[in-house]
Amino acid sequence: MDYKLIKTEEHFGGEALKIILNAPKANVLEATMLDEISDALARLSAKKQVKLIIFEGAGKHFSFGASVPEHTKDKAAMMLKFFHRMFYQLVDLAIPTMAIVRGQCLGGGMELALFCNFIVADQTAMFGQPEIVLGVFPPPASVMLPFKVSQALADDLALTGRSISAVEAKQAGLVNLLADQGQDAWDVASGWISANIIPKSASSLRIANKAVRMRFFRAVREDLPRMEALYLKELMESLDANEGINAFIEKRKPDWKHE
């Protein structure tokens, strides 16, 4: 498959695969990009030597999130199917994951980073789940945020839609490694990977990942479908969710009816 919206790179002699979201500046996780990511992940099932999957955004930003036009009522089911498939594939592979975050990491982009075992960020990184501003909520983040940060911060991010800096994300335990000012996140990450991941057995890393993330993986498998149903059957049947999405697309202020 010839990829148009992602690039893949092998690192450390093929023991790490980097998947680059390659549609700057926003690196929007639209259906076509998600399909390409899915294909890249499917190819990993036969590569026993891979010890780490790395996600990175091309350009100055990690990702602005999923495509808002694909959130409309008639497209939401397909969008969620493509997006959530990626998480189920990652659970099934059980290969440890890392996100290299620069600039904006929002919505679905933050959810991809949230899934990862490790987040390495530079000083420009900003993390946020702004879905509530559009009158919707983030299904994967609703499952994963309370595992990754405190319930208080999960509530804060999901219900206010505000973004937090790389420094605040590091203090909250969301970011594992924070590059110094002027230092590139990949330079920090590659040294850490070389010292901490590459010397390990690939098969043992996958088994250990299944073990340490047993509750996390179970929640993704069992609760994410419930969140998807809540999104489609309740949220998208409300007036305000549809108004919020349409207002964003039409570049106007939403007229909330509170129903």
Image (cartoon, helix red, strand yellow):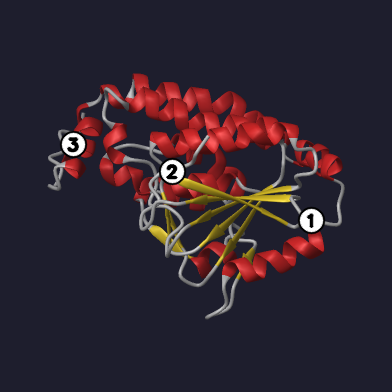
- State the image quarter where residue 197 is shown: bottom right
The C terminus - image quarter: top left
* Structural distance between the alpha carbons of marks 1 and 3: 45 Å
User: In this view of the protein, can residue 252 be seen by the observer?
Assistant: yes
Contact between labelled residues 3 and 2, with CB atoms less than 8 Å apart: no
Which kind of residue does numbered mark 3 sit on? Asn
Residue density around tag 3, few if under 14, some if 14–19, many if 20 or more, within 10 Å? many
Residue appearing at x 51%, y 66% in the figure: 166
How many tags in the picture?
3
| SS label for mark 3 | helix
Residue of label 2: 4
Q: Residue furthest front?
A: 2
Which mark is in front, 1 or 2?
2
Q: In front: 228, or 85?
A: 85
Q: Which mark is residue 257?
A: none
Distance between the alpha carbons at the discs numbered 2 and 3? 28 Å
Looking at the image, which residue is at 50% across and 44% down?
A: 111
Height in image: 89 above or below 208?
above
Q: Amino acid at mark 2?
A: Lys
Residue 186: where, in percent of width, then height?
Answer: 61, 66
Q: Are marks 1 and 3 in contact (CB under 8 Å)?
A: no
Secondary structure beneath dot 2 equals: loop
Residue wearing tag 3: 246
Question: Nearer the N terminus, badge 1 or badge 2?
Answer: 2
Nearer to us of marks 1 and 3 is: 1
Q: Is 238 placed left or right of 173 in the picture?
A: left
* x then y, percent, for residue 184: 57, 72
Q: Residues within 10 Å of mark 1 (few under 14, many from 20)?
A: some
Q: Which residue is mark 1?
A: 197
